[in-house]
Image (spheres, rainbow, N blue to C red):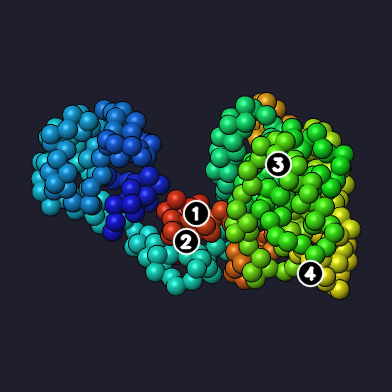
Amino acid sequence: MTEALFQFIWQHSLYQVTDLTTTDGEALTIIHPGKLNKDAGPDFLEARIKIGKTILVGNVELHLKSSDWLKHGHQHNAAYHNLALHVVYDNDVDGVAVNTPVLVLEGKIPGYVMRHYEGLMNIRNKLPCAGQHDKVRSITKEGWLTRLLAERWEQKLGDWNVMLENSAEDWRNLLYWRMAANFGFKTNATPFLLLAQSIPLNVLGRHRENLQQIEALLFGQAGMLNAAFMDDYPEKLQDEYNYLRKKYKLSPISAHLWKFLRMRPANFPTVRIAQFAMLIHKSEHLFSQIIETHSIKEVEPLLDVTASDYWSDHFRFDEVHTGPGTKTLGKSSVQNIIINTIAPIQFLYASRQGAESLRERALNLLEAVPAEKNNITTLWAENGWEAENAAQSQALIQLYNNYCTNRRCLECTVGLNIIRQAT
């Protein structure tokens, strides 16, 4: 028995709830166990308890051993005076909580609770509930996935809120920064974000109609125009950048931040920067267009970008490649951008505007995108829980990263349902 499990058992009433008595022999009924307190003070707040014919509303403290009351020094802490109840597993010392009724739960907790809990904690599978989550009703799991998606977006959008505040509430800037990070995908997201933040959006706006100048600004600020080139294209970009850099007093980021190793050439940051340059070149009022899109068919034309001609036979400067020609964003890349930028920014904007219908549209957009295929979703699928769409795959990623890997089964709806099953 652990303190966390004991709190879990109390919170979810996983004990014999009838014929309870205090250590003084008075009849006891738990009307409500109270709210779990994650701050300092008693473990549960605002519990409702009936002792004899008297109903008490107050706080509850839990201990594995009643002597822990003394060990933790509660007798000297006013926060633990006048409790409604002291709940212990093992009453090894009587009367430690003066004037506080005591309930002993030893012998009143079903054996299957401990058995199921230990099974989740000790399984070697990366998923503690492997082979068991199919016992949980589908509607229960679907509701849990909805909450997990909200939790994932809450964490992500908390950082985005900070970025928005740092940009003086300029939504165009937020979209520019987050879209840039997304073009870097997982490997080059950070240098891409730094690149975007190194060039004010209004500077790019002044040169939007001139693709070569946009490319010069992006490649130059990426630190990729410092070499002696053989091809005319990078030489022209270099000359253009040297002029624009002085004009706008720009400082490039370090070229060593960019990663090329173990990447498919089509995902090289050079190609992605060229595609991002084309997006800026062809897009006007992109933020308003993004906010107003409600379906994948409306989003796809906005992200239909192709790198400029030079990149039809190059993946890096001065290196001719005879492979596939046109460098467009693939379907999976477009879906990735919808999942990680477009739907979240729509949701954040709707939340800040208090527009519930727009929040629903953001969720509906995510549900229309196919589920992601990665190591985590594959692991879930191999264990019988396959995501039906991107909303579910995002939720399953959150579940694995934030709960399964840390064995937080006591905080998981699936874990709760497995533990409480009387089998």
- The amino acid type found where label 2 is placed reads Thr
124 lies above or below 149: below
Q: Position of residue 243 (x, y in %)?
A: 75, 42
Q: Nearer the viewer, mark 3 or mark 1?
A: 3
- The amino acid type found where label 4 is placed reads Glu
On residue 405, which mark appears? 2
Residue pointed to by mark 3: 245
Depth check, front residue: 46 or 393: 393
Q: Nearer the viewer, mark 1 or mark 4?
A: 4
**Residue 365 visible in the shown view:** no
359 lies above or below 1: above
Residue drawn at x 86%, y 70% as measured from the top left:
324
**Residue 125 visible in the shown view:** yes
Depth check, front residue: 150 or 265: 265
353 lies above or below 266: above
Q: Nearer the viewer, mark 2 or mark 4?
A: 4
Q: What is the C-alpha distance between the residues marked 3 and 1?
A: 43 Å
* Mark toward the start of the polypeptide (1 vs 4): 4
Residue pointed to by mark 1: 402
Q: Nearer the viewer, mark 3 or mark 4?
A: 3
Position of the C terminus, as image quadrant, is: bottom left
- The amino acid type found where label 3 is placed reads Arg
Q: Position of residue 164 (x, y in %)?
A: 61, 32
Q: Nearer the viewer, mark 3 or mark 2?
A: 3
